[in-house]
Image: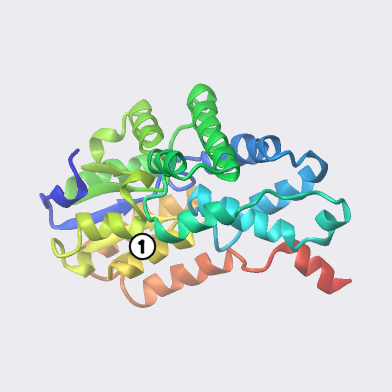
Amino acid sequence: MGYLEDFKPEKDFFIGIDSDGCVFDTMEVKHKEFFCPATVKFFGLFAIAKYVRETWDFVNLYSVTRGINRFPALIRVMDLLADRPEVAERGVTLPDMEPLREWVSRETRLGNPLFREYVKANPHPALQKVLEWTLAINEDIAAWLRDTPPFPHARKSIEKLDVVADTMVVSQTPLEALTREWKEHSIDGFVKAIAGQEQGTKSEHIALAAVGKYPPERMLMIGDAPGDLKAADDNGALFFPVIPGDEDRSWKLFHDEALNRFITGTFRGEYQNRLLGEFRRSLPEVPPWKDRKSVV
């Protein structure tokens, strides 16, 4: 697998596929068992742990920001926590996110290698703490997370795609973890390339690998998060949503029906719009604790 710019068409169609929470049922376990506990531990938020959990899950799993990169996710969680009266009432000091916010605002390749270089060149206690946090998460996931297979019809679909399309993993997971997980379950041989957070945003992945090489109507992104839809829209590609919480049905629908519609040119329009309507309804914008306040 070479650089994305060197991605050369071998078939008539291009399909990008997200990984965590889309192909693999790993998104919830990574956030609930690794990311969130590390956030409580490294930033000393034990006094508000239950609010950190609720906020972390909302930002990363159950809202329109589902699937965003870990660094902007951390900023978003802290911003929401700062706005919660329960946190203020407990007198908890939240970590300073401004140094991280500055880096995120001007960098698109939001991965640990570049962040490590940035922290070295711009030493700051707040950045050093985030670096320790992100490195520890990767180490723990690599050490402990195993035997989480793809959704059943995801595997069948990926095998089926190999016949008709050039397929690429388009993800914001670190490249090392992506490569390990796809290889562990023997599906890495069905994709031409694997792109992670180190290669830039998902939009950049598709732009480099596919734009100008395939007609837009022959480009499709499969994902479970609004960031996946944005990557498709940014590049004029079609989008098939894997509905959070209903992944098995989504992949069966793709395998039995949607793939054929994509290949035969009947995907765009009413069919895609119906899928997108269901997708958008599954991911709210307003946090549930604000809804609770409005009811009171």
Above or below: residue 131 compared with residue 221 = above
Horizontal side, residue 264 vs residue 105: left or right: left
Q: Amino acid at mark 1?
A: Ala
The residue pinned by badge 1 equals 231
Q: Nearer the viewer, residue 125 or 36?
A: 125
Residue 60 in sight from this viewpoint: no
> What percent of the width, then of the height, locates residue 144?
54, 23
Horizontal side, residue 57 vs residue 3: left or right: right
> What percent of the width, then of the height, locates residue 68?
49, 54
Count of marks, rendered view = 1
> What percent of the width, then of the height, locates residue 38?
64, 36
Above or below: residue 55 compared with residue 219 = above
Q: Residues within 10 Å of mark 1 (few under 14, many from 20)?
A: many
Q: Nearer the viewer, residue 124 or 150?
A: 124
Q: Which residue shows up at 81% across the image and 66% down it?
A: 292
What coloring was used for the rendering?
rainbow
Above or below: residue 194 compared with residue 180 = below
Local SS, label 1: helix
Q: Which residue shows up at 39% across the image and 40% down it?
A: 117
Question: Which quadrant would the N terminus be assigned to in this image?
Answer: top left
- Say which quarter of the image contains residue 264: bottom left
> What percent of the width, then of the height, locates residue 24?
45, 40
Question: Which quadrant would the C terminus be assigned to in this image?
Answer: bottom right
Residue 225 in sight from this viewpoint: yes
Q: Which residue shows up at 68% across the image and 40% down it?
A: 43
Residue that protrudes farthest toward the bottom in the picture? 270
Q: Which residue shows up at 77% across the image and 69% down it?
A: 291
